[in-house]
Every structure is written in C-alpha cells, then in structure tokens.
Amino acid sequence: MIQKPSSDAELSTEEVELLGNGWWLEESTPELDQLSWRSDVDGELGRGRLLRARLSPGRHVLTLTAGAGERAGSSSVIVQISPQPQPWINRSAAT
C-alpha cells in the first residue's frame, strides 16, 4: 500500500517523500522490512517504509514492492514531477 504520494499527484519538487507498507494476509502482520521502491523513469529508488527520492521531471509510475519471491506483492501510483524553478536573478541590480 502506498500512502504517499497519492496517485495523479502533481508535484513541483524533484525530491519526493515516499511512504508505504505491505501486509501479510496469512499472518495478519505488516511487512515493514522487505520494501523496495522503483520508478519507471529513474529505476530503483531505494528500500524501506519511508524514503526521500530525487525524481527527474516528467510522468512517473512509482511502484512499491513488499516481500520477496512468490510472496511479493506490489502497488503503483502515477505522479507528475514539474521541474524546480530556477532562482530569479535580477541582473540589472548586480551591475
């Protein structure tokens, strides 16, 4: 389950907070250890329940995979990352 970001989010920052977890139905327990994040654009992003990832501008399908092997499950969201604005420089004031 992906808790952050929500699907169809439009984010104006290149660093995104990812938050999620998995759930083992058979044991009725959360999976908090074997969690990996991936972007269809930027590839592997990291591991863990909470992650800050730098994403390139554009549309991303973010996927969280919980567990391993046959017991692995995944969830995905789509986000749009807008480029960070460049700092405004008043060139006339600098001369």
Image (cartoon, rainbow, N blue to C red):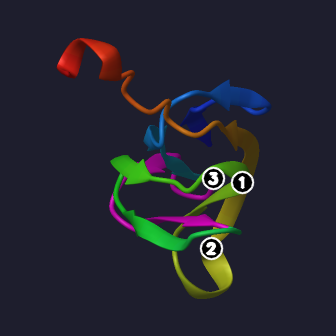
What secondary structure is found at the residue carrying circle 2? loop
Image quadrant in which you'd find residue 6: top right
Q: Are marks 3 and 1 in contact (CB under 8 Å)?
A: no
Is label 3 in a helix, a strand or a loop?
A: loop
68 is higher (above) or lower (below) than 65: below
Q: Label 3: how many residues lie within 10 Å, few (<14), some (14-19) or many (20+)? A: few
Amino acid of disc 2: Ala
The residue drawn where x is 63% and y is 52% is 25
Where residue 55 sits in the image (x, y, percent)? 51, 54
Q: Report which residue position mark 1 lands on.
A: 60
**38 versus 1 height, above or below:** below
Badges 1 and 2: C-beta atoms under 8 Å apart? no
Q: Is residue 35 magenta-colored? A: yes
Q: Judge whether residue 85 is colored magenta.
A: no
Q: Which residue is mark 3?
A: 25
Q: At 58% across and 70% down in the image, what residue appears?
A: 42
